[in-house]
Image: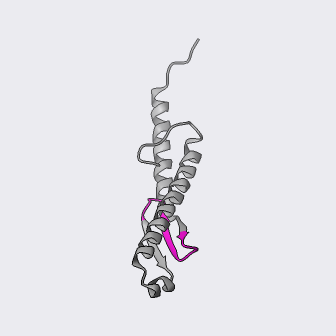
Amino acid sequence: MDKPFDLSGLFRQAQQLQEKLASVQQELAGRTVEASAGGGMVTAVVNGKLEVVQIRIDQSLLDARDMEMLQDLVVAAVNEGIRAAQKMTADEMGKLTGGLGFKLPGMP
């Protein structure tokens, strides 16, 4: 005879997954990735919440007074940093869901 559907067990599992998700999100908020542009002349540091937490600019760029190049390098470094942080987040969430084949809402 088939076992009856255990709705309370399903809710327990969902709650455990939600708790693990919150824990991973908190951990990711404290982790950072770095990405550079222009051979390291501009570096962006991005956390797991996809927030830019630091921009480092080589002094030689400031001395050159080439504002357009500086702006382009900052944009490139930030975009690459965001991509790296999204990958870090996706990798961690993939571990959490165990390859269930679905995306969690609000996660890249």
Instruction: Reply yes or no: does residue 40 show up in magenta.
Output: yes
**Image quadrant for the N terminus?**
top right
Residues in magenta, as a range: 36-51
**Picture mark count:** 0
Q: Nearer the viewer, residue 52 or 31?
A: 52
The picture places residue 99, in percent across and down from the top left corner, at 59, 39
Q: Residue at x 41, y 74 (%)?
A: 68
The quarter of the displayed image where residue 15 is located: top left
Q: Is residue 3 above or below residue 78?
A: above
Report the colour scheme: one colour
- Does residue 48 lie above or below 3 as drawn? below
Residue at image position (46%, 43%) is: 104
Q: Residue 57's spot in the image, x, y percent?
A: 48, 79
> Residue 3: where, in percent of width, then height?
55, 18
Residue 97 among those drawn in magenta: no
Residue 72 higher or lower than 1, as above or below: below
Q: Nearer the viewer, residue 57 or 15?
A: 57
State the residue in front, 31 or 14: 31
